[in-house]
Amino acid sequence: MIVKVVLVDDHTVVRSGLRRLLESHKSIEIVAEADTGEMAYQVYGEVLPDVVLMDISMPGMGGLEAAKRILQRYPQAKIVIFSMHEAVSFAAQALKTGVKGYVTKTGVADDLVQAVLDVAKGRTFLSQDVAQKVALQTLIGESNPLQQLTSREFEVFRLLAEGKRVEDVAEMLKISQKTVANYYTLIKQKLSVNSPVEMVRLAMKHGLIDAE
Amino acid sequence: MIVKVVLVDDHTVVRSGLRRLLESHKSIEIVAEADTGEMAYQVYGEVLPDVVLMDISMPGMGGLEAAKRILQRYPQAKIVIFSMHEAVSFAAQALKTGVKGYVTKTGVADDLVQAVLDVAKGRTFLSQDVAQKVALQTLIGESNPLQQLTSREFEVFRLLAEGKRVEDVAEMLKISQKTVANYYTLIKQKLSVNSPVEMVRLAMKHGLIDAE
DNA sequence: GAACGAATAGGGAAAAATTCCCGAATGTTT
DNA sequence: AAACATTCGGGAATTTTTCCCTATTCGTTC
């Protein structure tokens, strides 16, 4: 049985590479490509693939947003998120939205193929490197407070921690500054941090940002 | 010729350790000890040692403040600062106040002896680990924007970057919140950072604070 | 010794950010 | 359907931050 895959990434070259990589396995067939979240949604309805492999970071609607839309309309959709972020929080966030796989770009190439095949079979896949971190955190008993955040809160948190100003975040997310400010207050409460300083340290500790 | 040294550190045990360490060299003699900056100043006038070895962090007047006072009255004083901070900025700050040596606690024990002897001979000494960093930064051509800050500005910056609130900093430095706020604005300008977030990342990059 | 610039300290007032409280729309669960 | 969570923002009080300006002290320079 052949697994039909739709590839979603805004970079043409990357799509080509992924296509090569995946099609070298005879049980995988790329039936369509898309370069935006919007198009991914449309294409999904047209070809109804077994698996969608989607980049997390795309201009306009991001991968997670797109995944959310698709899942809303087709709850049985099997989506694998392809991400540059190794941080546990990103994976947690992704899986929370209902995607079935999370693969990092820094992981080994086999992971990607494995993810697609596993997910097609109805299983859930998590990149080895992320799985390692999760396991270690769990065993050490460290909790990840960022998981208390909702998807939207996490997004706001991430942007603020990156150094974006409230105004910028509002613009990027197309919501009012007031809303961002309110989220900010809420987030600080949830994470029990009192200053931007602690916020940055928390973000850094969890690998959302680094010192450059 | 024997080098007469005054030891300044608020911890008795540490002083004892340092005494042992230094006196194992026959050319060094500890002629007095002090456990505060104030006392260091007083003792200096009494015994007029060749070298003062002073801890940077002490309650009340810090090591740098004490060094500044001593140098004001005795400009030829030879002071070696003993510090827990490996960051280049701290060393730069110290040397700017006119001390002749900067030794980190994490460095090798020989550094301390060497520092005292070198400084006694009229030379300037910098810990190997810090020297390494400075050299690397220089060769790579990276500049350290924190050096633009004056001593007071640096102090305010450091405390704020640590997560202290404006109010706390004002209290700690015994100046008004207004002044701290004004410094804060000035510092952000000098470093061209626009948000507390960028400030923290800068501080982290230069090793003033770490992610824990 | 007078003059000058830099560093330190802070007042006043306007602008911006933050907090706290509340309401509404939408979606999800049970 | 009812209960709950999430997302979005308004209103108003409070704090922070900014910008501008003044004063004092010091070390440096002429």
Image (spheres, coloured by chain):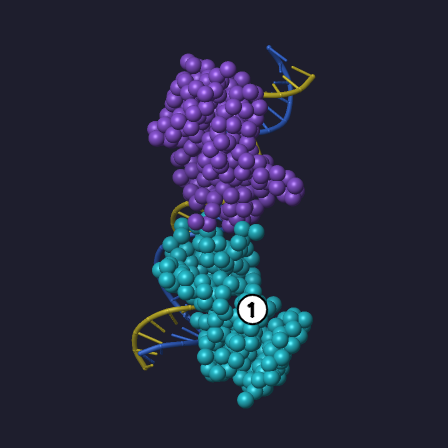
Chain colours: A cyan, B purple, C blue, D yellow
Q: Residue at point 38% right, 63% down?
A: A138
Q: Residue at point 67% right, 71% down?
A: A13
Q: Three-letter amino acid code at disc 1?
A: Val
Residue B195 in view of the camera: no
Is A124 on the left or on the right of B148, as rendered? left
Q: Residue furthest bottom?
A: A1
Rendered view: D3 above or below A162: below
Task: Report helix, strand or loop for mark 1.
Answer: loop
Q: Quadrant of residue B118?
A: top right
Horizontal and vertical percent position of residue A144: 40, 60
Is A212 on the left or on the right of A93, as rendered? right
Nearer-the-camera pick, B197 or B146: B146
Q: Quadrant of residue D15?
A: top left
Q: Please state, as top left, top right, bottom left or bottom right, where the N terminus of chain A lies in the image.
A: bottom right
Residue A16 in view of the camera: yes
Nearer-the-camera pick, A143 or B61: A143
Rendered view: C19 above or below B192: below
Q: Which residue is mark 1?
A: A108
Q: Residue at point 51% right, 35% down?
A: B90
